[in-house]
Image: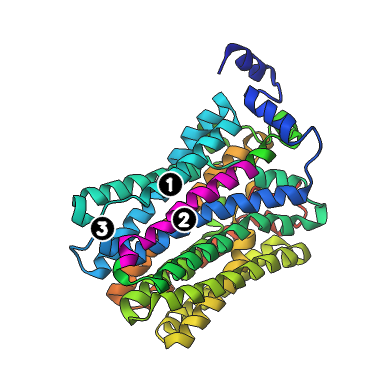
Amino acid sequence: MTAPIAAQNAAGDPLANSTSLERDARLVNARDHKIAPGEIAIGVIVGRTSEFFDFFVYAIASVLVFPALIFPYVDAVTGTLYSFALFALAFIARPIGSLAFMAMDRRYGRGVKLTVSLFLLGGSTMAIAFLPSYAQIGSAAAWLLAMFRIGQGAALGGAWDGLPSLLSLNAPEDRRGWYAMIPQLGAPLGLLVACALFAFFHSTLSNDDFLAWGWRYPFFVAFAINVVALFARLRLVATPEFERLFENRELQPAPVGETLREEGRTVVLGAFAPLASFALFHLVTVFPLSWVTLFTGEDATRFLVIEMVGAAVGVLSILASGVIADRVGRRAVLGVSAVLIGAYSGFAPQLLNAGSIGETVYMIVGFVLLGLAFGQSSGAVNGNFSGARRYTGAAITSNLAWLIGAGFAPLVALTLSSRLGAWAIGLYLMSGAACTIAALLINRQWGRKTRDTHAPLTA
């Protein structure tokens, strides 16, 4: 940061967190005119879809590709467990990435931070497409995959842009629930595209060709999608609305230590509140594909199609969560969906062992419940942060929630089910539902529908 910019920052200049390039982008893109909530929503959806697409491309390859390509020296179950262990590395790296990129944000501006983080995300994902196999370079292949996965996680931590806050603060007062669910649409949309690509290549190629080169194409696509998402998000980051929020300190990164010291209770509650939906998230997206391919011998393409149908149902369910939340309140949606997820955990494992019909019911019901819970759960307590720490507090809360609730879910679920049987995954899912209900009971102020004068930042 140059001395003039540092001086401006100390004086509270609203553009202190901007470089000259960002200020030029504001003039070119926004022309000093207000961006409508609909445009913000599109930018948010595009950005979140690109992130989740990268996420699911790796997750699907963890089941269909990496056990055979990177871990051929162990049995299929063990190889998949190793793949899921590497899968969890990104969630460990996310908080580290947030810290590093927030420092970049303070020094060079949010546009620079966002550009670097999204190119790191796309670059790490595309690099996996060139990954050599174990047969070519031995155990170094696993180390390279781990490094690329850490790069993905660090980039996701840095990709926190505050756009959901801009969307929420532009939302009508009586439609907070509707606008809160919009960023969450990126998850099922990203899954839908990832499943479609893998289903196409898996069904049209021989197994040898698929493992040799077919699986690599979705990773190339990820880089192109990230470039589109970058420009969509940069256009909004450079708008006058962001300038106003900088001035109000709503979107300025605060010191992490200070945030944890002053807002620790909110961080903890926010991390545990969405565990029901986050645990279910991987138990209907990543884990069931591994179960079906490893223990039923069914065709992976058929199940990928079922996942696509489930993802479409998830989109509709997330939309419904917004409508319901505006009518009855977010706390009611969160509490009821957690209870329903707890009930679902009691019979869901049996469905996975009930053939194709049972698997379909498992996925459809799971995505209905996931949409209702996930649509409103992420960042539900972030309205409780003070304005000066909301940006940083929301980022920390999101990273912790994903790490605790989702990062190890596929690994834990496959470990339990392979050793104890499918019924054991119900216990894991039940524990997530219990955490959500406990967090809701502790933070009773969620019951006040109009409590949030600022709508929450959604993860």
Nearer to us in this view, 389 or 240: 240
Label 3 to label 1: alpha-carbon separation: 18 Å
Amino acid on which disc 2 is placed: Phe
When the figure is inspected, residue 376 is found, relative to residue 355, above or below; the finding is: above
**216 part of magenta stretch:** yes
Give the magenta range: 209-232
Residue pictured at 43% horizontal, 54% vertical: 219
Label 3 or label 1, whichever lies nearer to me, is: 3
Task: Name the residue located 44 percent from the left edge and 52 percent from the top edge.
Answer: 220
Q: Tell me the crowding category of disc 1: few under 14, some 14 to 19, or many 20 or more residues within 10 angstroms, Cα based.
A: many
- The residue under the point 29% across, 73% down is 418
Decide: is 237 above or below 306.
Answer: above
Q: Main secondary structure of the magenta part?
A: helix
In 3D space, how far apart are the residues under numbered discs 3 and 2 (Cα atoms)?
A: 19 Å
Foreground tag (3 vs 2): 3
Quarter holding the N terminus is top right
Instruction: Tell me the CA gap for discs 2 and 1.
Output: 8 Å
Q: Which residue is mark 3?
A: 70
Number of other residues with Cα within 10 Å of mark 2, as a class: few under 14, some 14 to 19, many 20 or more: many
Residue behind mark 2: 55
Secondary structure at numbered mark 2: helix
Query: Mark 1 and mark 3 in contact (Cβ < 8 Å)?
Result: no
Give the residue number, with chain letter if any, for mark 1: 152
User: Horizontal placement of 433 versus 7: left or right?
Assistant: left
Q: Earlier in the sequence, mark 3 or mark 1?
A: 3
The mark nearer the N terminus, 2 or 1, is 2
| Residue at screen point 54% across, 33% down | 113
Q: Are marks 2 and 1 in contact (CB under 8 Å)?
A: yes
Reply above or below: 128 against 248.
below
